[in-house]
Image: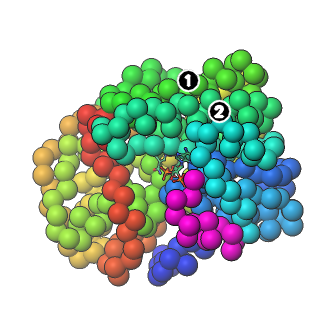
Amino acid sequence: MIKPIRDESELEEVLTRPSAALVDFVRTLSGPLLILGAGGKMGPTLAVLARRAAEAGGHPLDVVAVSRFGDAQTLQWLAVRGVKALSCDLLEAEAVARLPDAENVVYLVGLKFGTVRSPANTWAINTLVPARVCERYPQSRIVALSSGNVYPSSPVKRSGSVESDPLTPAGEYANSVVGRERIFEFCSQRNGTAIALLRLCYAVELRYGVLADIARKVNAGEPIALSTGAFNCIWQGDANDLILRALPLAASPPSVWNLCRPEVFSVRAVATRLGELLDRIPRFVGEEAGTALLANATRLCARLGPPPTGLETMLAWVARWVQSGGRDLGRPTHFEVRDGNY
Ligand SMILES: NC(=O)c1ccc[n+]([C@@H]2O[C@H](COP(=O)([O-])OP(=O)(O)OC[C@H]3O[C@@H](n4cnc5c(N)ncnc54)[C@H](OP(=O)(O)O)[C@@H]3O)[C@@H](O)[C@H]2O)c1
């Protein structure tokens, strides 16, 4: 029997509960641990996860979360949980210069949606900010988030692109993420900075993510497009745990890792299972195209261990959440997009 997650405080407790491996690892860190771009979907729970791991290990580690924090509630949420939150626009070189020194940096800054309307803004955030950060932290270890979007679509039967595949994606957003990686790579080569690039594909929790998107459609009786018929995902708590434990993988030139669960999931099968859990019959439109944006995370799972939260647990949690009217961040993933236009 899978214990349900009934409200946001239970959800946040689950998302920020550290593994034994993380508690052991965090003991090795000297502070502060700097988390850049911490105001988005993943950063707040990642920062608190690190903080809870330090507390569980009896290790006095300062965790500093940096973002513009347009949403003051996030700042407050972090402060109450023992994370030092600093408001900073990382495009501003002078503001970056004032940030505290740090041996260990987690880089989450990114911009995806709105690229079609304002591609220049996306390119600036995804390439200029990495350059500023690398200039400020040449001696640090950096784990930088990238995306599975750097790959083109691949045959579903192939089980996902591997890290050595060519980076020839469609659309400006994805190409700007290739640009993000290349700037990190350039700075690492020039300054000897140790960097690990993690190509995430995709994080899910109950308030957003591919599973929540599908569950909401099944529950509302809305049609589910099948052309993008397969996807990867990973529970956000597991992703954050692996992101922190990836710090020792940082190297110069950068090491590169796909980050997701090791399986490829079928949209049709997931919607059908959600239909059983929600007591609904899913409606489908179109047919599976045979190719999809997929990553193969075998290497990272072999190195750091497989993510513990399995699909059936995530589906049971998300079905119950949607059925009971749990909050939706209102940020659909648009995982069905096939032309790279976000
Ligand atoms: N979530 C996923 O499933 C997924 C999948 C693939 C890749 N990724 C990558 O993983 C990273 C974290 O994911 P996420 O979902 O948390 O992304 P997100 O929700 O877009 O958060 C990124 C945050 O970066 C901050 N930021 C942007 N420009 C900034 C600037 N000039 N100065 C300071 N902060 C700035 C923003 O917070 P403020 O508004 O507070 O500044 C933004 O919310 C991103 O780089 C993303 O590309 C995520």
| 227 in magenta | no
Q: Residue placed at 30% from the left, 37% from the top? A: 116
Q: Secondary structure at mark 2?
A: helix
The residue beneath circle 1 is 182
Horizontal arrangement in the rendering, residue 13 relative to residue 208 (left or right): right
Q: How many marks?
A: 2
Q: CA distance from mark 2 to mark 1?
A: 14 Å
Q: Nearer the viewer, mark 2 or mark 1?
A: 2
User: Can the viewer see residue 132?
Assistant: yes
The region drawn magenta spans 68-81
Q: Residue placed at 48% from the left, 27% from the top? A: 178
For the C terminus, give its image quadrant.
top left
User: Can the viewer see residue 316?
Assistant: no
* Relative depth, front residue between 205 and 32: 32
Q: Position of residue 170 (x, y in %)?
A: 32, 28
User: Picture quarter containing residue 133?
Assistant: top right
Instruction: Examine the residues drawn in magenta and state their main secondary structure.
Output: helix
Q: Residue placed at 33% from the left, 30% from the top? A: 171
| 76 in magenta | yes
Q: Residue furthest front?
A: 94
Horizontal arrangement in the rendering, residue 173 relative to residue 145 (left or right): left
Rendered view: 315 above or below 264: below
The residue beneath circle 2 is 132
Q: Amino acid at mark 1?
A: Arg
User: Picture quarter containing residue 250?
Assistant: top right
Q: Amino acid at mark 2?
A: Arg
Q: Position of residue 10 (x, y in %)?
A: 55, 78
**Label 2 neighbour load within 10 Å: few <14, some 14-19, many 20+:** some
Asked whether the beta carbons under mark 2 and mark 1 sit within 8 Å of each other, the answer is: no
Rendered view: 7 above or below 130: below
Q: Position of residue 306 (x, y in %)?
A: 59, 50
